[in-house]
Amino acid sequence: MSDAAERLTAALRRVQMRWRLARRPIRLVVQAVALAALVMAGFTFLSTNSEINETAASILVAVVFGAMTVLQQRQSQRRQYTVGLITAFQSAETLSQADVWMARRISAHQPVGADLTDDDEQHVLPLLDYYEFLAVLAVRGLVDVPLLLNLRGGTMTRCFELCRGYVQDRRALAGGEIYQALELLATEYRHRLRRARSAAGQRSTEPAGPEPAAPVGVEADPGTPLAGSPVVGTRPAGGSR
């Protein structure tokens, strides 16, 4: 019975995460449909009484505008909260040092297992704990999940994958629920990345139109990345993070 409950809970978490990762137009359409259904139900209820039938329209308009305002305010608050958490992460000295240490391990493809020294564990443990904290907030819908994944999703996913051996060792000692939210977030990020790559591959198979000509008197430099290229804005090789 407990296994079935755990599987159901995990499935509900995945559904919640995928809903929060859905594109904004899709979520707006679903929310609009749900709101329209509530409005129709309220209108039907109000129209059954002839005495309040005259005020039904004004009440419904107030309900619709109030609901839309609340949704927009909550979305704005989640964005601000998410940015604040990322800013706090970057300004905390302990987490910043742990992030630099982990980035070196990721660049060197050095997995993090159970055989860590005490000094290394002082970098791994705070970083995984903070990422788990962010992932729990994401699962519960308290932060802007797409924004969080755009800012730290790749780093959080690579960190979890590199530390999988360490996580499994801690789960064997302390319980299988450790870092579950982070694992869920990393899984959904990989699914999102695969879908984006698949869509990009489909677009690349379509016939491309003619390339725009360079301005008169300016020679095109093949080594210069185009605007919007992932090369633009990256740090030079050997620079600090």
Image: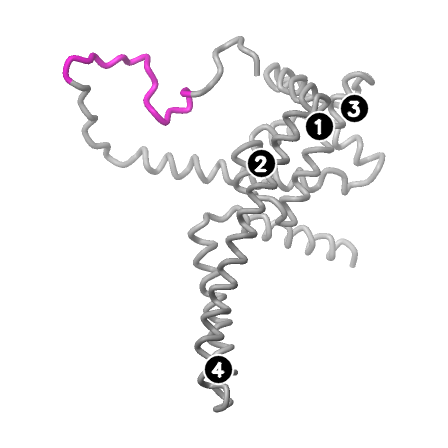
Q: Amino acid at mark 4?
A: Thr
Mark in front: 3 vs 1: 1
The amino acid type, in three-letter code, at marker 2 is: Val
Tell which residue pokes out farthest to the right in this image: 173
- Read off the residue under disc 2: 83
State which mark lies toward you, 2 or 1: 2
**Nearer to the camera, 52 or 204:** 52
For the residues labelled 4 and 1, the Cα–Cα distance comes to: 53 Å
Label for residue 44? 4
The part of the chain drawn in magenta is 216-232
Task: For the N terminus, give its image quadrant.
Answer: bottom right
Which of the two marks, 4 or 2, is nearer to us in this view? 2
First in residue order: circle 4 vs circle 2:
4
Element at label 3: loop
- The vertical placement of 234 against 187, above or below, is above
Which quadrant of the figure contains the C terminus? Answer: top right
- Three-letter amino acid code of the residue under disc 1: Leu
Q: Secondary structure at mark 1?
A: helix
Q: Which residue is mark 1?
A: 127
Residue at point 23%, 34% (across, down): 207
Crowding near pointer 1: few (<14 within 10 Å), some, many (20+)? Answer: many
First along the sequence among labels 4 and 1: 4
C-alpha separation, residue under disc 2 versus residue under disc 3: 33 Å
* Local secondary structure at mark 2: helix
Kind of residue at badge 3: Ala
